[in-house]
């Protein structure tokens, strides 16, 4: 079920006293990435690294990779199957939303290979 | 973190407490631990919901009570009474009799707490919170639950003053000329409202001079009526406090608020339902909901921990009563409100609630992470049957307590069983389990 990983991570972040607004950003991004892994890939894992001022979340799937990354980053563009869309996902907002939520995003992907998302979040809340 | 010292109304009656773990297991914020045979409440985590009091088999949890003798130190004694109080009596006691009795007991002015709803309507008070869905702050226990357990939703909390506070402001403004010796008292159906109105330094603190618990007030009225049956005749004294509108009178019932809010609304009552719902809401990226009415008690305030009568019967009486009051606001009352408009000027919204960082294992991220790791390692070694004999509500809580150096692994009774006979009887109930506390020795330091 999509959202379980994000939900578990949320519980963890609360225990680590991460500021609520940062938790919100991380959870939005991780949720989207989690949906992507479930909807488009063969499976994957989420790694979370805590530093003094930053949190780095890596989402690594096992393939098949994104053929055209620029297109995938376009709002509204989606390759989601009918089945996924029926569940209410696949609006083509996944990667754009991730980009908006995190402070730094780097993506490694290649058609036929896997996709590796690295998201960086600053812990200092800029209010 | 809020520096304000939160007032707590619930306390443990030490001599009655048997340390039976009922309250500890029920607490929605895991605020209770047992030590030396007695329950202890962590005031940082307690949200004053009263679940522990409801479940205690030994009447060992109580709610503080202002003494009634303090009434004597005031010359003008105002009671702000929620409509739910009147619903505590069965139909053999008329509204008129209750009111007459309250005057006879020494109150000089009575106001219905729900009048505040009409005041807010007349003054067209706007909420300053902009995140949707807006979560009602009517139930102070829910507000505190969100501050403690759901910090991501704090921004959704309404900032409007509660009707009882608004009514208190109204009463103070109307009775300005009697300000010397003016005492305003609130009748409370639960611990959470006492805590809210008594938290020092808060605005509410100044509005009320004392709180009278529902059960106490109920007993006073009943014993007075029993003694003066003939004297308290039907409707000897009419309502001298403003009669509110139908919508206001139903405010504290489930759906009382949400049915008056535009857009898509939802009402959820009872603590475990509220928690389940907030968990979903916190995960949900988008919802179509505009307004949420969340009540900690089943059926809303009629289910308050200090109420006397069955909540369903009380709901029925309140509903029946409300069907007899007009939908439109009384013209006289409306004029009275408008006359005192200035008293409320720019004062209908409260400071937005802030998250309370009390769930974290440490204020320092790195240390918190260390403790989290440690707790995970400890948890793996604990039996996982959540028996509560260690004095923590579950194995996970014990693991975290140990990681925070607030408990010791030696508290686990199951890990301590050594003799073959003990282990055998344990295996008969729980099956064979690997009990390996040895690997944990490093963590005890």
Image (cartoon, rainbow, N blue to C red):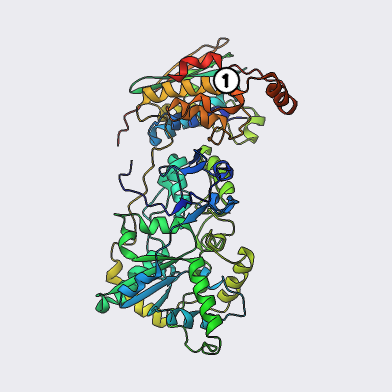
User: Can residue B302 be seen in this snapshot?
Assistant: yes
Q: How many marks?
A: 1
Quick one: label 1, few (<14), some, or many (20+) residues within 10 Å? some
Residue B176, horizontal then vertical, whole percent: 26, 76
- What percent of the width, then of the height, locates residue B112? 44, 73
What residue does disc 1 label?
B381
| Viewer-side residue, A23 vs B64 | B64
Q: Can the viewer see residue B134 in this picture?
A: no
Chain of the residue that carries numbered disc 1 in the rendered image? B
Residue shown at 52% from the left, 32% from the top: B397
> Looking at the rendering, in which quadrant would you find the C terminus of chain B?
top left
Locate the N terminus of chain B by quadrant: top left
Viewer-proximal residue, B398 or B321?
A: B398
**Residue located at (33% from left, 21% from top):** A52
Relative to B441, does residue B119 appear above or below in the rendering? below
Which residue is situated farthest in the top direction here? Answer: A113
Q: Is residue B129 above or below residue B87?
A: above
Left of B307 or right of it: where is B444? Answer: left
- B142 and B380: which one is in front? B380
Residue B249 position, x and y percent, is: 51, 71
Residue at disc 1, secondary structure: helix
* Residue at point 45%, 27% (across, down): A98
Q: Position of residue B148 (x, y in %)?
A: 44, 42
- The image quadrant of residue B317 is bottom right
């Amino acid at each position: 079920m999509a959202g379980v990983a994000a939900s578990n991570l949320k519980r963890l972040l609360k225990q680590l006293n991460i500021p609520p607004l940062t938790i919100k950003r991380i959870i939005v991004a991780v949720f989207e990435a989690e949906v992507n892994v479930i909807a488009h890939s063969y499976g994957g894992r989420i790694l979370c690294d805590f530093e003094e001022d930053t949190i780095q979340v890596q989402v690594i799937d096992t393939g098949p990779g994104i053929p055209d990354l620029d297109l995938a980053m376009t709002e509204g563009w989606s390759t989601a199957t009918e089945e996924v869309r029926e569940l209410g996902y696949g609006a083509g907002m996944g990667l754009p939303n991730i980009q908006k939520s995190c402070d730094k995003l780097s993506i490694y992907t290649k058609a036929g290979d896997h996709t590796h998302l690295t998201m960086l979040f600053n812990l200092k809340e800029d209010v | 973190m809020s520096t304000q010292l939160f007032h707590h109304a619930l306390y443990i009656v030490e001599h009655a407490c048997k340390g039976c773990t009922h309250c500890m297991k029920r607490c929605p914020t895991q605020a209770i631990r047992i030590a030396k045979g007695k329950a202890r409440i962590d005031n940082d985590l307690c949200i004053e919901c009263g679940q522990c009091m409801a479940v205690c088999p030994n009447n060992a949890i109580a709610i503080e009570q202002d003494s009634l003798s303090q009434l004597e130190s005031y010359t003008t004694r105002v009671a702000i009474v929620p409509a739910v109080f009147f619903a505590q009596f069965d139909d053999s006691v008329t509204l008129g009799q209750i009111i007459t009795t309250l005057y006879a007991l020494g109150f000089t002015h009575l106001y219905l707490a729900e009048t505040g709803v009409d005041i807010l309507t007349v003054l067209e008070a706007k909420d300053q919170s902009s995140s949707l869905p807006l979560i009602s702050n009517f139930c102070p226990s829910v507000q505190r639950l969100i501050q403690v357990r759901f910090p991501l939703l704090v921004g959704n909390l309404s900032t409007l003053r509660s009707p009882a506070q608004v009514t208190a402001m109204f009463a103070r403004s109307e009775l300005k000329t009697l300000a010397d010796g003016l005492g305003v008292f609130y009748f409370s159906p639960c611990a959470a409202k006492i805590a809210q109105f008594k938290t020092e330094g808060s605005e509410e603190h100044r509005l009320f001079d004392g709180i009278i618990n529902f059960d106490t007030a109920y007993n006073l009225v009943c014993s007075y009526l029993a003694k003066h049956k003939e004297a308290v005749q039907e409707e000897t004294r009419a309502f001298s406090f403003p009669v509110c509108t139908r919508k206001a009178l139903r405010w504290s019932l489930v759906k009382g608020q949400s049915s008056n809010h535009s857009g898509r609304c939802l009402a959820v009552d009872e603590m475990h339902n509220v928690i389940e719902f907030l968990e979903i809401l916190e995960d949900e990226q988008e919802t179509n909901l505009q307004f949420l009415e969340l009540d900690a008690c089943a059926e809303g305030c009629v289910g308050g921990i200090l109420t006397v009568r069955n909540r369903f019967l009380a709901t029925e009486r309140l509903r029946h009563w409300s069907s007899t009051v007009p939908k439109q606001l009384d013209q006289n009352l409306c004029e009275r409100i408008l006359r005192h408009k200035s008293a409320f000027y720019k004062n209908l919204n409260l400071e937005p609630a802030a998250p309370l960082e009390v769930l974290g294992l440490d204020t320092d991220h790195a240390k918190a992470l260390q403790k989290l790791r440690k707790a995970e390692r400890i948890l793996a070694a604990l039996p996982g049957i959540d028996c509560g004999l260690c004095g923590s509500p579950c194995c996970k809580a014990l693991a975290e307590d140990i990681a925070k150096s607030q408990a010791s692994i030696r508290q686990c009774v199951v890990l301590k069983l050594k003799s073959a006979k003990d282990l055998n009887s344990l295996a008969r109930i729980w099956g064979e389990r690997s009990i390996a506390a040895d690997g944990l020795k490093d963590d005890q330091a």
